[in-house]
Image: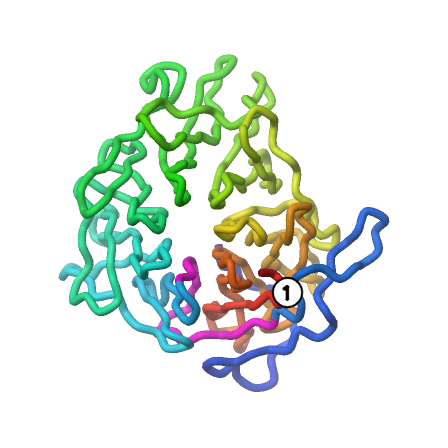
Amino acid sequence: MLRRTRAARVLVAGLLTTGLTVAAGPAATAASSDGRARAVGCASPAPRALDRLPGSFAVVRALGRPGIAAGASGGVPVYWTGTEVHRVPLPPGNLAGEVTAINRHGLMVGTLRHPSTNATTAFSFRIGATKVRLLPGGIAANDVNDSGVIAGVGSGHTGVLWKNNRVHRNLTVDGSGGAYGAAFTAVGINNAGTVVGGGSRYIGGEWVGVGLIWKAGPPGHARTLLPEAAPGEGYSAVAADISRTGRVVGHRLFTWGSPVRWDRPYTQPPTDVAVPTELGAEGYSTAISPNGRLTAGYAPNRWAEPGEESGAALVWTGIGGSVITLPRLHPLGTAEAHAAADDGRIGGYATGLPAPEEPETAYPVIWRCGGAT
């Protein structure tokens, strides 16, 4: 969530401009096991701000083929060609929403919101079309693979897959009215057809959040991503995205989030992923590139004191998950990363700092990791 930085911050001299690229300064580094910095495979990831519609918030949530990105700006779904922003043509009704994913063939998916009722509708869209296509029974569309299979949530608040604008598969969990909660979601799908999502499970007298995974092939119930929280532990497991090879990224959620990753065959608890110590213990993984080499996320650093670093966009590189803090548009601004591509692009937002009486402005940003492919 975009948050206002403290009034004690230093003001920017001058204005951020469209298409601005900010030099990253020293080469990007990550902490090694002995605490010293070392170079890793994400050289000079300078942020490039894209055009935006009027409004205080804009974000890149999806990356397609080179030069194509999508997300939200001014409260509505948009896409970018280069740095130029384009509105997704919406049905009548003063709708809000965002694009959440794009496949390599340019098929976009996302979710619309009806401000008067707060109801949501899933949609798909291709560049050049005159309108979006509403997905039957869909209340959210979260991901799409290169075969055009869309993962999201249906009107029954359960996971659904669509293809060719029809329901392709209704996802199920074992005992959805008993051991598992009746509501669950599908958040990611890879080209093999493996689906990842989340729901809740009744364990030891309490409901806890669990990550769920559905294997491709004949329809079957979801498996729970370990661990299954013991009674009284009170934490949840949240899955966010899945790579081509089946690596799942997400976080454990207790008082705050702690980033983790799961690997096939999903028989072991997840591996903890580091957050830079100067940004505190809290962090979230939001997306993984299809080839699994880049994981995007952020650390909100919500307890930073005046003059200290605010929230930061993060990227974890390679198999070992070395972590890099991506450069901000301004040292006292905040940033988050929400998309990752095989060609080294990372998408998200970064804030500029206007005068204290003005709303903080979030600019849609793409970072480019050199040496990441």
Q: What residue type is labelled 1?
A: Gly
Task: Say which quarter of the image contains residue 130.
Answer: bottom left
The residue drawn where x is 83% and y is 51% is: 35
- Image quarter of the C terminus: bottom right
Residue 200 vertical placement versus 81 (above, below): above
The local secondary structure at tag 1 comes to: loop
**Which one is nearer the viewer's eye here, 5 or 161?**
161
At x 35%, y 51%, the residue is 146
Q: Is residue 344 magenta?
A: no
Residue extending furthest bottom?
A: 14
Viewer-proximal residue, 76 or 136?
Answer: 136
On the image, the x and y values in percent for residue 28 come to 70, 65
The residue segment tinted magenta is 46-64
Residue 300 position in % (x across, y down): 59, 53
Relative to 179, residue 91 above or below:
below
Q: Name the residue under label 1.
A: 371
| Residue 339 screen position, x and y as percent | 48, 56
Q: Which colour scheme is used?
A: rainbow
**Residue at x 61% of width, y 59% of height:** 312
Count of numbered marks: 1
Q: Which of 147 and 362 is in front in this view?
A: 147
Apparent side of residue 220 relative to residue 289 in the rendered image (left or right): left
Crowding near the residue tagged with mark 1, few <14, some 14–19, many ≥20 C-alpha atoms within 10 Å: few
Residue lying furthest left: 92
Residue 185 spot, x, y in % from top left: 36, 35
Q: In this view, does 60 lie to the left or right of 237?
A: left
The residue lying at 24 percent from left, 31 percent from top is 156
